[in-house]
Image (tube, rainbow, N blue to C red):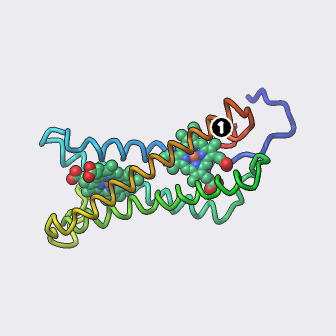
Amino acid sequence: MTTDLSPIRPPAYDAGARFLHWSMAVLILLAFVLGLTIDAFPTVLKHAAIEAHKVMGLALILLLVARLAWRLAHRPPPLEPASPLMTAAAHLGHVGLYALMLVVPVIGVVYAIKRGQGLDLGFFGIPPFTAPAPRAETRPLREWHEWTAYALIALAGLHALVALWHHAVKKDGTLRRMLPR
Ligand code: HEM
Ligand code: HEM
């Protein structure tokens, strides 16, 4: 039962958009932490950790496709009134997040393929497409994968801080647009 008796609700993202936003935010954070800590796993668990990392990244690509489809089919709820400069900065930040959400896992896929890796989930697997290329050839891809992942986390962190600032300092409805109704 809802206690909200107000007939007018401020505009907000729908349940599908909120699910995509928050599930992807959690998965990105998990994939990032797992990616950075893979070398710390004991040898027996390392393979499983890498495969788990790859599955999370592949799931993120699928979720991103769904999210871009949602975005093309819907107009986001109108923004809180802000200066044209702030509105442009928010738009640029969102475009940057979308671009990095695509670039990071795609580089990961290319790196894994070039390293001669398939996918091994035990009950399901994809065999390698090619023999492993020499490490010297694949190192730049791994470095790009790592640095673009840092850029994604940094931009997402800034984005989260701005959302919290809107909520706690400006006390407007920006954060509530992305929270359960
Ligand atoms: C948003 C999604 C992803 C994030 C945030 C992410 C992040 C990272 C990070 C931070 C590392 C550590 C880099 C290093 O220490 O050099 C890493 C390693 C790696 N990632 Fe990703 N990654 C993502 C998606 C993917 C995908 C889709 C694949 C492939 C299907 C993939 C394959 C790999 C591989 C093979 C490694 C090297 C693991 C090792 O041998 O130590 N990643 N990733
Ligand atoms: C990896 C983490 C995150 C990523 C990649 C991400 C990405 C995005 C993107 C691309 C949008 C724009 C949606 C659209 O209109 O197309 C968005 C909206 C939003 N995000 Fe995030 N987000 C992340 C984490 C967070 C966190 C932690 C918070 C809160 C503390 C947050 C709060 C919001 C809010 C309130 C909106 C709506 C803002 C508006 O419409 O102006 N996000 N996010």
| Label 1 sits on residue | 180
Question: What percent of the width, then of the height, locates residue 136?
Answer: 16, 66
Nearest the camera: 140 or 85? 85
Q: Is residue 80 left or right of residue 19?
A: right
Question: What percent of the width, then of the height, locates residue 5?
Answer: 84, 30
Q: Is residue 76 left or right of residue 17?
A: right
Residue shown at the point (50%, 49%) measured from the top left? 155
Residue shown at the point (35%, 63%) measured from the top left? 107
Question: Is residue 18 visible to the viewer in this orientation of the structure?
Answer: no
The quarter holding residue 72 reads: bottom right
Question: What percent of the width, then of the height, locates residue 106?
Answer: 38, 64
Label 1 crowd (10 A; few <14 / some 14-19 / many >=20): few
Residue shown at the point (63%, 61%) measured from the top left? 71
Residue farthest bottom in this picture: 130
Residue shown at the point (64%, 38%) measured from the top left? 179
Looking at the picture, which amino acid does disc 1 mark?
A: Pro
Question: Is residue 160 visible to the viewer in this orientation of the structure?
Answer: yes
Specify the quadrant that holds the C terminus: top right
Specify the quadrant that holds the N terminus: top right
**Quick check: 110 above or below 173?**
below
Q: For the residue labelled by badge 1, is the local secondary structure a helix, a strand or a loop?
A: loop
Nearest the camera: 25 or 122? 25
Question: What percent of the width, then of the height, locates residue 103?
Answer: 42, 62
Q: Is residue 87 left or right of residue 18?
A: right
Q: Is mark 1 within 8 Å of ligand 2?
A: no
Nearest the camera: 34 or 126? 34
